[in-house]
Structure formats: C-alpha cells, structure tokens
Image (cartoon, coloured by chain):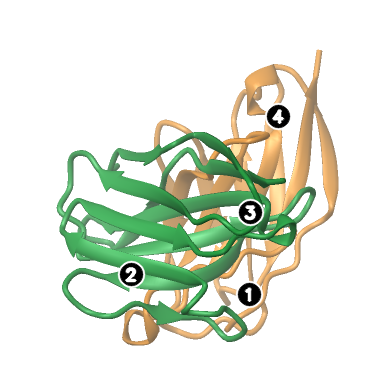
C-alpha cells in the first residue's frame, strides 16, 4: 500500500492562531487525498476531499474558510486551521487514494491542541 | 451511503481465530466492502476489501455472503497486537468520490 506521512505529529497553539498540517504521499502520486477529523472516543469524520490542481470538496457542515486545503502537487496536501479555537482541538488524519483498486491509505495523524 | 452494523465490542483469546461480523443489508451491486483497524492514537490501517468473492491476504480473510448483505473478517491467529477498533465500511462508488463513511466499529480485545 501507499506510505503516507503527516507533519507535525502533534501541535499546541494559542487560540486565534493558524496551524498548517502537511500530508505527504511518499511513494505514490496521489491525485486525490482526504482529510478527516476524530474527536476523543469518536469515529473518524470526513471533512473534505482534496484534488490536485483544483478546489477541495467539503462535506456538509465543514467551513471551507476555516479549514483551508491546498493540494498543489501530487505528493502534498495541506490543511490550515485558521483562527483556531479550543473546540478545534482534535486528531486530524489524512489519506491518499492509491492503487488500481482506489484504496485509501491513511497517515499517522496530527494531534492539535488549542489553548 | 450504505450503512454497516457491527457489534460494539468482542473479546478473543490470544492464538485463537477472531471472527468479526458486519451487516450491510443495503449494499448496492457495485459497492465494495472495506475493513480497516485503528490502534489507539494512530491512523487507520487498511486490512482487506472485497466485492463478491472471499478474499485472503497476509493479514486476514474476508468472507462475504452470497447475497452480499453481510461479511465476516477473520484474523486466523489473534495476537495481543491485534487489539484495536475494527471498522467495516461500504465504500461510496467511484462516481460519487470513493468516500469512506466510518461507523463506530468493533472494539476487539485480544486477551492472554
């Protein structure tokens, strides 16, 4: 399967600041990547689909101006949480769509804590 | 999106086979069944997927009923490191974005 990395693995920031999370596909050129969010003891929730060279598609209820997604190359997608607030504290996970069967392979996740 | 139903938790003895059931009675003909697992504070790990036929790989076997309304993931010799949340997901077809909609999953506890 595809190997996916995320950076940083964990970040703590002050309320009102912006945080950028990187998702890299290390061994596969990914046209499509996905961003998920997971709150404690809850399941993953899809936030948006990131398509290389075009605008991301956001799921219902996800604010596109707050969660900025950029997929400028086939190996990198970034998620920027703008003006972060404590309620944005969560585990953010990306995945890439890879292989002949279009299977999703996930990154290790980024733990965001907003103080 | 086709929904899945899984038991909230299961226990399994180390070294024994773990059989995790999943119901997906509303699955459509071109929708695949995917299994992932998530160990605490890590990203989900792909296990296996299938459409109609039973599948096997180095991690597990997937048994899909003939009517495709249910499936079972089999870990043949469970180890303590297999303790995780297991998600059975019916993938949204490619024309709708290949999305995965995660349910609550099954917490599998492997005990020595």
At which x and y percent is residue A69?
A: 37, 67
Which residue is drawn at the image coordinates 77% and 48% (left, top)? A40
Residue that badge 4 annotates: B83
Residue that badge 1 annotates: B69
Distance from the alpha carbon under mark 1 to that under mark 2: 31 Å
Distance from the alpha carbon under mark 4 to that under mark 3: 13 Å
Which residue is drawn at the image coordinates 47% and 79% (left, top)? A64
Distance from the alpha carbon under mark 3 to that under mark 2: 23 Å
Dot in front, 3 or 2: 2
At which x and y percent is residue B86?
A: 66, 47
Q: Chain of mark 1?
A: B
Dot 2 lies on which element?
strand
Dot 4 lies on which element?
loop
Distance from the alpha carbon under mark 1 to that under mark 4: 26 Å
Give the colour of chain B: orange
Residue B87 bears which disc, if any?
3
* Foreground pick, B111 / A64: A64
Chain green in the figure, letter? A
- Asked if residue B61 is positioned above or below residue B14 in the image, the reply reads below
At which x and y percent is residue B60?
A: 51, 38
**Which residue ends up furthest to the top in the rendered image?**
B112
């Amino acid at each position: 399967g595809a190997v996916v990395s995320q950076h940083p693995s964990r970040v703590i920031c002050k309320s009102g600041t912006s945080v950028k999370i990187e998702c890299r596909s290390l061994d596969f050129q990914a046209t499509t990547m996905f961003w998920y969010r997971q709150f404690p003891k809850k399941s993953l929730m899809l936030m948006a689909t990131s398509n290389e060279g075009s605008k991301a598609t956001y799921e219902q209820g996800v604010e596109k101006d707050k969660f900025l997604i950029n997929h400028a190359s086939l190996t990198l997608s970034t998620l920027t949480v703008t003006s972060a607030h404590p309620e944005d504290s969560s585990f953010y996970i990306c995945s890439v769509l890879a292989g002949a069967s279009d299977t999703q392979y996930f990154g290790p996740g980024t733990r965001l804590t907003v103080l | 999106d086709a929904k899945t139903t899984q038991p909230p938790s299961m226990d399994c003895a180390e070294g024994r086979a773990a059989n995790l059931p999943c119901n997906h009675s509303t699955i459509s003909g071109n929708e695949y069944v995917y299994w992932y697992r998530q160990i605490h504070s890590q990203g989900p790990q792909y296990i296996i997927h299938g459409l109609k036929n039973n599948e096997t790989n180095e991690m597990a076997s997937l048994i899909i009923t003939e009517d495709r309304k249910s499936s079972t993931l089999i870990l043949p010799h469970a180890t303590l490191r297999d303790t995780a949340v297991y998600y059975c997901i019916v993938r949204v077809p490619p024309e709708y974005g290949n999305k995965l909609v995660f349910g609550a999953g099954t917490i599998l506890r492997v005990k020595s």
